[in-house]
Each structure stands twice: as C-alpha cells, then as structure tokens.
Image (spheres, helix red, strand yellow):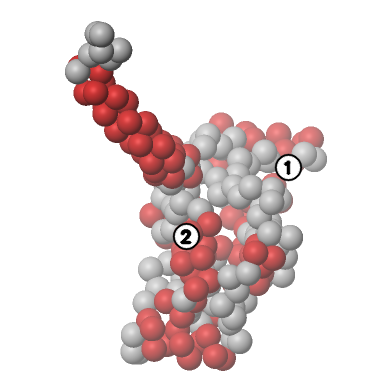
Amino acid sequence: MAALFSPHSNVVARRVVVLAVLAVVGIPLLLMWWVRTPYVTGQGHTVAQPIPLFSHQIHVTGLQIDCRYCHYAVERAATAGMPSSETCIPCHSQVWRTGPFFAPVRASLTSKAPIPWQRINRLPDYVFFNHAIHVNKGVGCETCHGRVDQMAQIRQAVPLTMSWCLDCHNQPERYLRPVDQVTVMGWHPSQGSQLSQGRELKRRYHVRELTTCTACHR
C-alpha cells in the first residue's frame, strides 16, 4: 500500500511548525518594539504652530525669559497654562507688532480668541499628570521637555511611555533638583553628585516612589 504522505511532507511539516512558533513569538515582540519607536511615541516630532517663526531658543536663551512668565500656572495647576495674547505685548517693539510675524497675535487681540497653539507633549486621556506636583517636588522642566532653550522649533523630547515615567517614579533621586532651579536649562549640581543631592532633596521634599496604578490612572 502506498504511503499516505511523501517523505517531503515531513520537511514541510517541520517548516510549518517552525514558522508558526516564530509567528506566535515574533509578532508580539515586533509589536512591542514598534509601539516604543518614535513613529508611535512621537519623540522628536514637531507640530506646525500658528506662529511659524516663534522660537523658544530666542525667548529662553536670547531674552532670558523664565518658563513661568508664559506658562504661568505650572506651579499651582495640573496644566502649565498657555500665554494670553496680552502677555506678548510688553516685550515687543512697534516693529514686531505691525509686521506679518505678529499677525496671529493681532488677530487674537481683535477677536478676543486665544492663539490656537498646538500641543506637543500629549498624554492619553486615561493618564493623570499634574505639573504643579512635579515642579514643586524639584522635577525640572527640561527633564520632560528637553532643552527648549536650544529648540528653534519645539519638539517632543522624550517618549512619554509608561516605562519612561516609571523610570523616574522608581528612582526620583536621579532627577531631582532644588525647587528654585526647576526652570534652569542645562542644570547640574553645584556640589556633590546628582545621586547624593537627589537623595537629600527626596528626603527634604518628601518625595515618594509612587508606582501604584492609581497614581497615574484615576
């Protein structure tokens, strides 16, 4: 009686099993890698703004404007706050006020509608984040937003993934600085190491290692 399967079918069967195993293991691993790439997290991406020539580099480095002048609510609210059109007026000369660069600000002043700035760092709706809590515990602006003093066009500096957040929540001493230095760009400890000073600040500011689900998902 002839064999039901040819000897070659054994080779085919082995290859099918190997491919199935690779698919079961490889596809989830590939997806886990993919969701951590800048294509998904948005790290390094920029967004077109209503005032294309607006430069954080000029305002922070050139004019030495503190972050809190424009982002006025950062020390007392969950959101950092965006500057009103009136905030721009005192610093700008008549030349800038009448030029095309300033047209969106003039339109905002006339219509009483805020300038439609586009958010760069965006978290999912199910994530709770409070700027005031972090700033008042010694987490510097550049820890999350990067060196905005070097950005002509603002971009997302970090991945903002859950693992990235937990990296800080597990060991906050690696990132803490004195509260009066939170807006300083390129800050480094004046004495000792980051870890030694961070441990002292962690104790002084009563910083807890919050890693429970409800800390960020409420």
Q: Mark 2 points at which residue?
A: 164
Q: Which residue occupies the foreground of this view, 17 or 144?
A: 17
94 or 4: which is nearer to us?
4
Specify the quadrant of the image occupied by residue 71.
bottom right
The N terminus: image quadrant: top left
Q: Where is residue 69 in the image (x, y as percent from the top left)?
A: 62, 63
Amino acid of disc 2: Trp
- Give me the disc on residue 114: 1
Instruction: Report the residue at 56% width, 37% height from top.
Output: 49
Q: Can residue 79 be seen in this view?
A: yes
Q: Is residue 134 above or below residue 111?
A: below
- In this image, 78 relative to 31: left or right? right
Please identify the quarter of the rendering in which residue 146 is found: bottom left
Q: Earlier in the sequence, mark 2 or mark 1?
A: 1
**Marking on residue 146:** none
Provide the secondary structure element on which disc 1 rests: loop
Q: In this view, does 53 lie to the left or right of 30?
A: right
Which mark is nearer the camera, 2 or 1? 2
Q: Which residue is drawn at 46% across and 67% down?
A: 167
Q: In this view, does 121 lie above or below 188?
A: above
Q: Say which of 71 and 155 sits in front.
A: 155
